[in-house]
Amino acid sequence: MNWWRRLVHREQLDRDLDRELQYHVDRQVEDNLQAGMTADKARRLVRVQFGGLEQVKEDCRDARGTRWAHELAADLLYACRLLVKERGFTTVAVAALALGIGVNNTFFIVINAVCLRGLPINDANRVLYVATRDAHERDAGVSYKDFRDLEAGTRAFEGLAAFATAPAVIGGEGSAPERAAAAYVSALTFRLLHERPLLGRDFVPTDDAAGAPRVVLLSSALWKTRYGSDSAILGRRIQVNGLTSTVIGVMRVGFRYPDGASVWQPLALLPGLMNQSRDSRALGVVGRLRDGAGIAEASTELEAAAGQLARQSPDTNNGIRIIGMPINDRYNARLTDPVWLAFMTAGLLVLLIACANVANLLLMRASERTREVAIRFSLGATRVRVVRQLLAESAIVALLGGVAGLGVSLVGARLLSVALTGNAPYWLQFTMDARGFLALAAVCVSTVFIFGLAPAVHASKTEISGRLHQAGPGSIGGLRARRWTSTFLAAEFALTTVLLAAVIVGFRNYGAARATEVAINPAHLLTAWVSLPAERYPTPEQRLAFYERVQQRLRGLGGVSSAALATALPFGGATARALQVEGQPVVSEAPPIVSTVTIDDRYFEALGLPLVQGRTFAEVAGVAKEHAVIVNQRFVAMYFPDQTPIGRRVRLGDAGDLQGASWLTIIGVCPTIRQRAQGVDSDPVVYLSLQEDPPAAVALLLRHTSDEASLPPLLRQELRSLDPELPLDRVMSMGHVISESKLGGRVSQALITVIACIAICLSVVGLYAVTGHAVVQRTHEIGLRTALGAQSRQVMGLVLQRALTQLGYGLAAGVACTGAWQRLLGDPTQRYRLTDPVTLAMVAGIVISVAMAACVRPARRAAQLDPVAALRHD
Amino acid sequence: MALPKSDLPQGTLDMLILQVVALGPIHGYAIARRIRQVSNDALQILQGSLYPALHRLENRGLLRAEWQESETGREARFYRLTPRGRAQLNTETANWTRLADAIALVLRSAEGGDR
């Protein structure tokens, strides 16, 4: 009979045991009688020989090895009954835990998606991402020529695949052209990723050759939205970047590698690919390890190949290292980043606060249950057994809290996904998976010990006689219990202090950032993007000519007062480049980095921000436009403090080759317009003329007098008359651009605010409960004091004093913790720190006032106690 | 698990029981009687430790028990060896013999050393 059946058929086994032993006893008695004993003596002898029949039975039951399970079941059943009976306690404890576990699990869901799960690639840890590092350890891709040599020179890979991404315009068949994320991939790419098209065929090497017929693969999403999941899509001819291409397949739902692509074309179709020089390192490269080959082997090969290339082409490849890393290392955020550490810590803090809260509830309950525990002891329960029984209650509370917390976290994760829709990489999914459930289970189990162990051990620790004596709640419910409670409460407030400080610092830094930026009037400012495919606008001259025509058309548009083009919108990021200022010492190792934005003549006019000093590109005479730049005030403050910047010259370029760049003359100074959405200080920005290097994509800015809705159709029409195959993309108001750029910051600030609110609520509820409980416990004492003449104010002081002491300890510990948080996880680039005295004063103010509010009611109740009734209270 | 309440070294009771049961299906009372008989009353095991030991052996899969009519006509719980039980008995007997031999050897050589 196996263990499980022994567990289930307990009654049957017990009956058998009784019968078996009875048989033995009867036979022994018979034998004794036959040996001539009296009936009495015969029986007594048997009893002596057995040494206690019940004990023997107990030993036999022990031999089954199922006792602990039965006891556990009994404990759990008892715990359930008790929790149902004490609904109030159960509700509060489960709610607190649900919040703690819920917040923690939401954060884990996010961390799991961002840092752990990685790309949805089959057997992803066998896929390496291959990249290069230059002598300055800067990250770059692989050039086409190097890629071909690597393909030939490595054995550790099943194969290597290269890709490049660029937005594409999908058009044709009379419907409006549409911009889509697109990738040029070498023929092996999908095979190496273990991906097969859902419909049609994969690329083959003959597709990926110069002069091959143009073919294209579509994502499921594009197939659905643009072609209505047309089953006759295969073989259809569509326009990609204005060139006729044949659709040969559709990829599966959710496959968007690389970079969320919707359209894939063979790498050979990338314009200019074959002529790219060896140092044009722009391709991404992935490879799948051959069976039996490891990362170390592949790395050695890549290193050797890099050495070989450096010997063959020293001009371009000297000092270039080639490295391979598991593909998910490339795309996963690093868990050790301060941002994620802070994130995890915050989640853990809320969980700990919730646990401390529940622990206090349990402690208070334990002090009311002394009599029950004492009776158990006196009936022979061991300490382990009592602790176990109390832990069983905690386990059920934790289980309920865990289930409710899972619900909370699913809602939280859903809200986050909605908030971040369209702003997160395609593979991020805030969902539970096996790892998520494992983590949740681990959290639930550990909470049992965090909040349950101390109260249980405490409850099991006093002598029986003492227990039975101090039966009533009016007696000294245990000085130790009070110490525990105070410690937990202080810990709660300490953790709350840290979280509140983080929130307040966040708001203050946000305010500080707002204060430094120039207000752009976003009303009546429409923005949109146009990008020119390299297939049809390969030369700068063609692009410039197109932009000039666009400018003319836009200015002629009714209701438009001013129109401009730029490579980046305000708050929309910028290109970072190395800077050298003429006449200032050169730091060739780490030159200063500035942001650059390429704009046309009317940019500042359209934004409604006149220059502070100097002239715009249009107004300047004497300097060739391509050698003129405008800088912002922040730039002037950083590089020309107390000097006039007009006429000074700067060079821009890559860190390595600033020397080769030509000198640019500063002709004007503009107000500081933010390019980065995050951070306190705006970047120094250098504005270049659009004519210097006409970009492949520009943003249009239109200051208009008409209403928001009527302009985009007009704009589209104008663009179509210029080039029917160009889509107008991301059409939105400037206000929308600004709010979207701040989304990430807003979401994280909202998150920490929510959890800080949860934290303070939990702490305050905890303080209220503990103080209220203390008043009940001290009823007798308070009655005595009142009877002896204590004023109600003195009584209130008595109650408040204890609360304040706990609060004081908590605040002090919390301040110490904020220091640690700032050191370990703080962002040093922010203006205000967590340890900033004003921040801490605000935190203390909030905590103390809220806590006092929580204590008022218990204190008043104490003050209004009727001394006669209180003295009779037992 | 409580120790067998007898003067026997630990594990010996189990071996004795296996040895007795090896002779054929037998109930608890008879096992106790047999052990007393074969050891010439030298080994008086308390019934208190016999039954827990039987149940332990049964739960470990060394013995199997079923209700059968006994010699008195009443139903009794009869134990018999399982194949695993037989194997266990063989190893334990072998171990025991080896140990006894070794002890005997040590005692002999100790006697010799005294001279």
Image (spheres, rainbow, N blue to C red):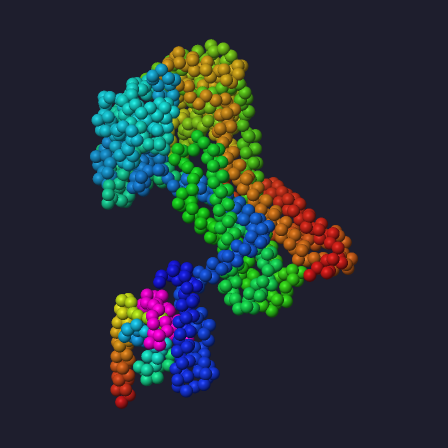
Looking at the rendering, in which quadrant would you find the C terminus of chain A?
bottom right
Q: Viewer-proximal residue, A205 or A379?
A: A379
Q: Is residue A524 magenta?
A: no
Q: Quadrant of residue A757?
A: top right
Left or right, A247 with reference to A765 = left
Residue at 54% across / 25% down in the picture?
Answer: A518
Q: Quadrant of residue A187?
A: top left
Q: Is residue A255 visible?
A: yes
Q: Viewer-proximal residue, A585 or A288?
A: A288
Residue at 58% across / 54% down in the picture?
Answer: A85
* Residue A285: percent from left, percent from top: 30, 34
Q: In the current view of this chain or complex, which residue is farthest to the bottom?
A: B115
Q: Viewer-proximal residue, A527 or A563?
A: A527
Q: In the current view of this chain or complex, which residue is farthest to the front?
A: B73
* Residue A746: percent from left, percent from top: 52, 34
Instruction: Give the magenta part as a residue range.
Output: B48-75
B101 over A171 or under it: above or below: below
Q: In the current view of this chain or complex, which residue is farthest to the right?
A: A789
* Residue A153: percent from left, percent from top: 22, 36
Q: Viewer-proximal residue, A841 or A476?
A: A476
Residue at 38% across / 79% down in the picture?
Answer: B45
